[in-house]
Image: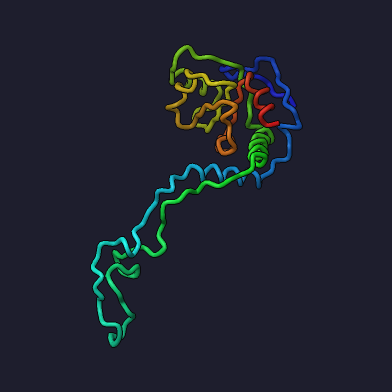
Amino acid sequence: MELSVINTKGKDTGRKVTLSDAVFAIEPNDHAIYLDVKQHLANRRQGTHKAKEKAEVSYSTKKLKKQKGTGGARAGSRKSGTMVGGGTIFGPKPRDYRFKLNKKVKSLARQSAVAHKVKDKTISVLENFKMAAPKTAEFLAILNQLSLLGTKTLFVLPEVDKNIVLSSRNISRAKVVTVNDLNTYEVLNADRLIVAEGAVQKLEALLN
């Protein structure tokens, strides 16, 4: 499989890169994707939620009415969860939502996510570029030339480029990552995947 290399102005450079069918054209495993995305979102949860239970609510423990003879249900104190302002019954407690996922499953999920982008033709190879200084306007100009303004776009670089990362940081629908930081959730969350020319071989090695 071959993809044309485009420049920052969106024009074809005339060069092509070859993608291995064994890596980029596999049949995506959607269940592996589901598990990896589920783990990613679970790991992001703080788990600091807390509701006061019966023993923690600050009310009197006085019995509200006599046990029998009132014609209504039995009632204890104001702390009861059945009372307005009472404790929450089985309320949320602080907890860790993380769970283990095998490395091979995560690797398959990431490979499947990229394969979906290839299958949907929403992946492009961009020639390597540099920025002399962090300039958001300059990065926006590149997005405009590539017709990506307003589109969720994930840029994959071969290595960290501080100027490019800082230039994209304030753009809500664009994100820049390195090959080693690529994860399934971000690949699927992006409408377009833009891979730097120098990152193609690294990405193939990572997915393989």
The quadrant holding residue 179 is top right
Which residue occupies 28% across, 72% down?
77
Please tell me which residue lies in front, 186 or 65: 65
Q: Is residue 145 left or right of residue 93?
A: right
What percent of the width, then of the height, locates residue 122?
Answer: 63, 32
Quadrant location of the N terminus in the rendered image: top right
Q: Residue furthest top?
A: 132
What percent of the width, then of the height, locates residue 20?
Answer: 74, 28
64 in relation to 58, above or below: below
What percent of the width, then of the height, locates residue 132?
Answer: 47, 11
Which residue occupies 67% across, 39% down?
104
Which residue occupies 29% across, 62% down?
57
The quadrant holding residue 107 is top right
64 in relation to 191, above or below: below
Quadrant location of the C terminus in the rendered image: top right
Q: Is residue 87 left or right of residue 7?
A: left
